[in-house]
């Protein structure tokens, strides 16, 4: 058992580095012969007896309704094509019909594992667009919530990742039930804060709707401490497990230069040795008031992504606990309590982009205000850049040459959330 | 309990032991669910009957009421034949396992070979199901299953050879009798005995498609493997066969390595057989709920690169041991 030490932060422990597009990446992970995602199957090998397998959209392990068309030679994948859109709900189009105030509850369902991240992302863009200030107290609440959401999201990922390797009710199911026990504690926290466990609708333009109730800070600190201890249990359970290592080490290695090219971000990119974290690089909310350790790993495989995510979980627990100690007094919203949907107006037709570091990477929002006077409370265009969608673009490169078992594990390690992919 | 006529003996004993085995298998599912529940911070079945004790009956009733679907392009004959055949292969191995002195259906002089060959025959119905379902996941599951069963047959047989050499007989009753008085083959000869027991146990897990070797089923990869297209009681029969196989493996392992009905002192009897085999049975559940599954090529690598040489070494050692002592 390799103990509970944190993931190796970016260090020069014998890893050779090179620079790709101005970013430092480990040399070992650069793969010159990437699989061809547009491979012509007819010309692949005329003698091979190929089989087309549609994995999904009802497959139990594609994390929702992803469909991957696999061309198999025996059990080895030759070509993989992901098909998206089975969960398309037209959120971006809806945003063009609803006012800035009404949009928040709609986007809750995008990334349904950490809903508050969506609210934070879209409201930060709206605030930038209308030039609204956010009070310090609200910034703190937002940051604390974001970090707790990150813990909850990574907990769910760990559980489902166990399922991917252990069967629907099999061995991995045990870690699944354990992580869900902890996630339940976090959902209870949010219930105390906002009254909801899922569709919070708590962030609004200019601040928050719900203030921290009495005793919540203490309760949250206790819960986070509990989860910090339980993280050690997971490490005992999973990290030293021979079967877990056999299934993850060296599986689904992601080339960092390809990842940067495809716009991958978040833990997937950090596990490939790229030191990027928007919380540190472009501090938003209250992140400028706290030191953030960014964890990277230079192995780039599924095990590295596990290591990075667990380290991030501990770091998020630390950040949230420290911020909870010093929440400043003051108002929680700079605007008057919003009663009417048209209360927030952005009449100048500007275009802004703002991004946050969601548990899956860079969750960005591009908003264009409407110049038409009667439409000034409604965005002209609202584009959501979801990290999962970019992560899925790796599949045509990750799958070829692997068998189905590895494809499932590699897909699970990307942590795709289909609600966010299809929007 | 014995009858003069072997046919009557086999019929009566078969009726008793077969039904007891089926009953234990049914309730093992209840036990497993309770056990898994405790491991996962939940109570397990509680609704049907006290402590959910009627759950297996309710499950069977539910499965019987389900619509029996046969895929349009399935090979109907093979498709319908496969589930009963799996149960047949699993249950027949019970015939040669003695649970107490005289309590055996057919005391064959090739007993252990009979049990193992039926275990290896079980690959045919599984492959039949995989092929006849006309489903790609089932096909992959059947393919994996065939590869796995054929590979693990060899180390399984090699590890079973150790007690055969030590007891100088293929008859399971003789093997148990050779161990009476505490000379369990798992502990004597010291070292290799326990290795042979572990090898037998692990290969049996692979034979019965249990985690960490449940590659043919692999819920998360192959949806449900060979049983993907099966519904209702046919699906139930696959489940039943799997649990039966696991149970009979525990019985065989107890008879071969743990002294069968041999108890402390002179207290021999069926109760010790039950305690030992059910402990092994529960151990298999424990493994199932704590481990993940290997990949199919890793599974083959373990078999051919580690288990097979180990099995050969153990056979040679036991032959040498018998020669020298």
Image (cartoon, rainbow, N blue to C red):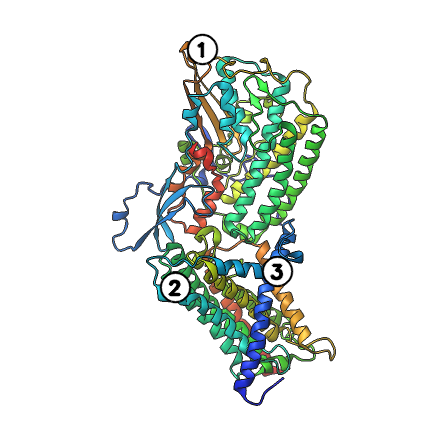
Q: Chain of mark 3?
A: B
Q: Is residue A254 left or right of residue A230?
A: left
Query: Depth check: B133 or A129 in front?
Result: B133
Crowding near the residue tagged with mark 3, few <14, some 14–19, many ≥20 C-alpha atoms within 10 Å: some
Q: Residue at x 68, y 32 (%)?
A: A220
Mark 2: secondary structure:
helix
Disc 2 target residue: B79
Location of residue A394 in the rendering, given as x and y in whole percent from the top left corner: 41, 39
Q: Residue at x 64, y 53 (%)?
A: B46
Disc number lying in front (1 or 3): 3
Please determine whether, in this image, residue B256 is positioned above or below residue A344: below
Q: Are marks 2 and 3 in contact (CB under 8 Å)?
A: no
Q: Is residue A37 visible?
A: yes
Mark 1: secondary structure:
loop
Crowding near the residue tagged with mark 2, few <14, some 14–19, many ≥20 C-alpha atoms within 10 Å: many
Quadrant of the drawing holding the C terminus of chain A = top left
Disc number lying in front (2 or 3): 3
Query: Depth check: A60 or A269 in front?
Result: A60
Q: Which mark is residue B54?
A: 3
Disc 1 target residue: A347
Location of residue A8 in the rendering, given as x and y in whole percent from the top left corner: 57, 38
Q: Quadrant of residue B52?
A: bottom right
Q: CA distance from mark 1 to mark 3?
A: 67 Å
């Amino acid at each position: 058992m390799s103990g509970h030490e944190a993931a190796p932060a970016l260090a020069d422990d014998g890893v050779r580095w090179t620079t790709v597009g101005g970013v430092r990446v480990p040399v070992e992970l650069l793969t010159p012969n990437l699989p061809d995602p547009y491979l012509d199957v007819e010309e692949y090998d005329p003698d091979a007896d190929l089989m087309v397998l549609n994995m999904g959209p009802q497959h139990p392990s594609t994390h929702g309704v992803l469909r991957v068309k696999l061309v198999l030679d025996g059990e080895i994948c030759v070509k993989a094509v992901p098909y998206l859109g089975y969960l398309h709900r037209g959120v971006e189009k809806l945003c063009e019909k609803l006012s800035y105030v009404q949009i928040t509850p709609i986007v809750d369902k995008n990334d349904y594992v950490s809903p508050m991240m969506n609210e934070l992302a879209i409201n930060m863009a709206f605030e930038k667009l209308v030039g609204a200030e956010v009070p310090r107290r609200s910034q703190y609440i937002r940051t604390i919530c974001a970090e707790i959401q990150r813990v909850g999201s990574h907990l769910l990922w760990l559980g489902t990742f166990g399922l991917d390797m252990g069967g629907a009710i099999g061995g991995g199911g045990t870690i699944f039930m354990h992580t869900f026990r902890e996630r339940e504690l976090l959902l209870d926290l949010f219930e105390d804060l906002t009254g909801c466990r899922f569709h919070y609708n708590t962030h609004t333009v200019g601040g928050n709707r719900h203030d921290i109730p009495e005793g919540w800070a203490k309760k949250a600190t206790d819960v986070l401490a509990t989860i910090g201890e339980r993280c050690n249990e997971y490490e005992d359970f999973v990290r030293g497990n021979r079967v877990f290592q056999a299934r993850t080490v060296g599986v689904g290695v992601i080339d960092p230069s390809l990842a940067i090219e495809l716009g991958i971000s978040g833990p997937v990119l950090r596990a490939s040795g790229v030191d990027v974290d928007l919380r540190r690089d472009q501090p938003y909310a209250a992140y400028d008031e706290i030191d953030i350790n960014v964890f990277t790993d230079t192995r780039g495989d599924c095990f590295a992504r596990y290591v990075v995510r667990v380290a991030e979980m501990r770091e998020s627990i630390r950040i949230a606990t420290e911020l909870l100690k010093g929440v400043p007094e003051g108002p929680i919203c700079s605007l008057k309590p919003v009663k009417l949907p048209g209360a927030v107006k952005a009449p100048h037709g500007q275009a802004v982009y703002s991004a946050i570091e969601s548990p899956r990477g860079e969750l960005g929002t591009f908003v264009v205000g409407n110049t038409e006077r009667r439409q000034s409370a409604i965005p002209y265009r609202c584009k959501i850049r979801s990290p999962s969608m970019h992560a899925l673009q790796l599949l045509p490169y990750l799958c070829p040459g692997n068998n189905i078992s590895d494809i499932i594990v590699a897909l699970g390690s990307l942590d795709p959330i289909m609600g966010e992919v299809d929007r | 309990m014995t009858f003069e006529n072997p046919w009557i003996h086999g019929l009566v004993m078969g009726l008793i032991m077969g039904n007891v085995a089926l009953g234990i298998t049914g309730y093992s599912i209840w036990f497993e669910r309770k056990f898994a529940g405790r491991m996962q911070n939940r109570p397990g079945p509680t609704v049907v009957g006290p402590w959910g004790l009627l759950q297996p009956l309710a499950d069977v009733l539910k499965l019987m009421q389900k619509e029996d679907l046969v895929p349009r392009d399935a090979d109907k004959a093979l498709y319908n034949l496969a589930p009963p055949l799996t149960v047949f292969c699993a249950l027949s191995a019970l015939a040669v396992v003695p649970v107490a002195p005289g309590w055996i259906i057919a005391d064959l002089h090739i007993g252990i070979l009979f049990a193992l060959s039926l275990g290896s025959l079980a690959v045919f119905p599984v492959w039949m199901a995989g092929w006849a379902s006309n489903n790609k996941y089932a096909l992959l599951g059947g393919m994996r299953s065939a590869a796995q069963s054929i590979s693990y047959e060899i180390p399984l047989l090699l590890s079973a050879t150790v007690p055969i050499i030590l007891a100088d007989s293929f008859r399971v009753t003789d093997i148990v009798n050779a161990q009476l008085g505490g000379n369990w083959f798992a502990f004597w000869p010291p070292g290799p005995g326990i290795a042979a027991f572990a090898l037998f146990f692990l290969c049996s897990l692979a034979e019965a498609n249990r985690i960490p070797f449940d590659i043919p089923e692999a819920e998360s990869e192959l949806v449900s493997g060979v049983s993907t297209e099966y519904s209702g009681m046919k699906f139930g029969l696959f489940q039943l066969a799997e649990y039966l196989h696991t149970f009979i493996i525990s019985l065989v392992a107890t008879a071969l390595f743990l002294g069968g009905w041999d108890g402390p002192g002179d207290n021999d009897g069926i109760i010790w057989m039950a305690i030992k085999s059910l402990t092994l049975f529960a151990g298999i559940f424990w493994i199932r709920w704590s481990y993940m599954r290997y990949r199919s090529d890793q599974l083959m690598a373990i078999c051919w690169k580690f288990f097979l040489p180990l099995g050969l070494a153990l056979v040679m050692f036991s032959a040498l041991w018998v020669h020298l002592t």
